[in-house]
Image (cartoon, coloured by chain):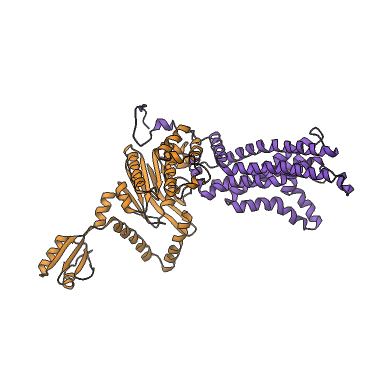
Chain colours: A orange, B purple
Amino acid sequence: MIEAFGLTKRYGTKTAVDDLTFTVRPGVVTGFLGPNGAGKSTTMRLILGLDAPTAGTVRVNGRAYRDHDSPLHEVGALLEARSIHTGRSAFNHLLALAQTAGIPRRRVDEVVDLVGLREVAKKRAGTFSLGMGQRLGIASALLGDPQTVILDEPVNGLDPDGIRWIRNLLQSLAAEGRTVFVSSHLMSEMAQTAEHLIVVGRGKLIADTSVEEFIARASGNRVRVRTTDPTALATVLTGPDVRVEATGGDALEVSGMSTDQVGIAAGAAGITLLELSHQQTSLEEAFMDLTRDAVEYHGTTSTTTQSTTEGGSALTTAGANR
Amino acid sequence: MSTTTTKSHSTGSVPNRQSAAAPKKVTQARVVVSEWTKLRSLRSTGFSLLAAVVFILGLAVLVTSVTVAHWPPNNAREAAGFDPTSRSLAGIFLAQLAIGVLGVLLITGEYATGMIRATLAAVPARLPVLWAKVIVFAAVTLVVTVPSALAAFLLGQSILEGKNLQTALGDPGVLRAVLGAALYLTVVGLLGLGLGALLRNTAGAISALFGVLLVLPIIVRFLPSSWADPIDKYLPSTVGEGVMHVHTDPSALGPWAGFGLFCGYAAVVLLLAAVRLRRRDA
């Protein structure tokens, strides 16, 4: 269980995490979704006590991370950008971490086998590919057999086989009743792995919802319609929240109305329809829509100078994340 | 979590708790063990220590051999002030580069690679990590430098015997100077560790360390002597090296008082580093 209350982190003038309140529950995989620079990594650093929040608090398994006597047994984390000394072997890296909590050597062997690094365990981590580095990071997250697992972009650099392996691993961890919190900037990946989603954009919470709901809401009422007279049809499709867009040729895209409503309106006006279909928005599009809205919201509520600073400092965050 | 699990309980690909053993607290002793694993598992540790030993022994042989070959010196003053102990310990000044860099890298290597995040996530109290590094580094450096300094001394004296210039460990101040050489190297490394933890940057910390030890005394010498002398008396390099000299300058601090001050400088840097480690984001 991870509970964040009003979590805020500012670096200078840039607000990386802005008043985030959310709860990550045990038993399901929770996806932490947002574009690059949305504050995902920063939030994870705050959860692990690596950075101190400017405001707000975050608790893991009921306590601040720092207050756990044996943190590796409570929370296992895969941190972004490989938090591994390149000159040390995978085995010794894990052994050193394990020793801080009195975890025995055989457990190190076990997690090495689990992530499939047995053959290269004695090689220096600097020689590892990105995918092997990720596996090593996951091994370190599992060392203490923790109740809560936090993984930052775990599928980065993994091949399809590795991605499927991660997916199964995360789901089986959740099935055992553990809390699993996984960040990603890929909506499609999260849709296949996670059950619950926490979506952030520019450090703010955009959505805290089940994946199912998110997909349903994102697909919305988008209707594609082809007609002999698009101009006339556009004028009869009116109503609150209805938007009509000409998508070229004889086609319109209507949002805010169902196919039934469009068909009835066209019939009443005597307009011939050539095609009438429900549009399934791709998840990726839905996600982009959502986060674009967050950006637009910022643009309209802040002055030009402010939005310039924010645009500029988005780069700074990317740098700080590294 | 589960209290009823037995060996037959298997969860397929997911490891279960009995293999991870019961949760144990993070203690200073455990962090020391962890830091020892970290130190011994990097090649740079072996190379740096080997370099230090080679410098200490190699220069002892070289300097004493050259001394014997050119004895007696043309300059009578040089003959009068001859210190056979310091001739055999000349390599300490070169070895301090290797040991100092090792001390710096012990912590900046973690910042450079991102390892520090894994380290501090495992030990969120943070300070035990710094203290463990101090303990492990000091122990390892002493274990290497005490025998090296003794060996360099004995080797050097056996060569100086060729012209009957040798001294013995039992002579006044000699054992103190030889052990002091090992202690000096250790504290140089700890000062490097402190600067590394404070600055979190390899190049910056190495520059600061050798700027203070090697460059600062040169700059002070450019000052008028009414300024230079009292400043030089308390410089880290002066007070640190004092413990290695058998013949001490009467105007200087005593060898142990000076060395104590040198340790004090290192302690202040380490304390500042501890404050920064505790307060600042990783």
Q: What x and y, as percent, mark residue B20?
A: 43, 33
**For residue A229, side relative to residue B241 (left or right):** left
Please give the name of the residue rendered at 34% of the width and 59% of the height, measured from the top-left corner. Answer: A291
The N terminus of chain B sits in image quarter? top left
Please give the name of the residue rendered at 70% of the width and 47% of the height, measured from the top-left corner. Answer: B94
Of A274 and A37, nearer the camera is: A274
Q: Which residue of the protein is positioned furthest toward the right in this rendering? A: B76
Of A206 and B107, nearer the camera is: B107
Of B215 and B127, nearer the camera is: B215
**For residue A100, side relative to residue B93 (left or right):** left
Judge whether B156 appears above or below A244 on screen: above
- Quadrant housing residue B246: top right
Q: What x and y, as percent, mark residue B47?
A: 61, 43
- Quadrant housing residue B193: top right
Number of dots carrying numbers: 0
Q: What x and y, as percent, mark residue A295?
A: 36, 62
Q: Do we see residue A61 in this rendering?
A: no
**For residue B86, side relative to residue A33 (left or right):** right
Q: Do we see residue B259 in this rendering?
A: yes
Of A7 and B2, nearer the camera is: B2
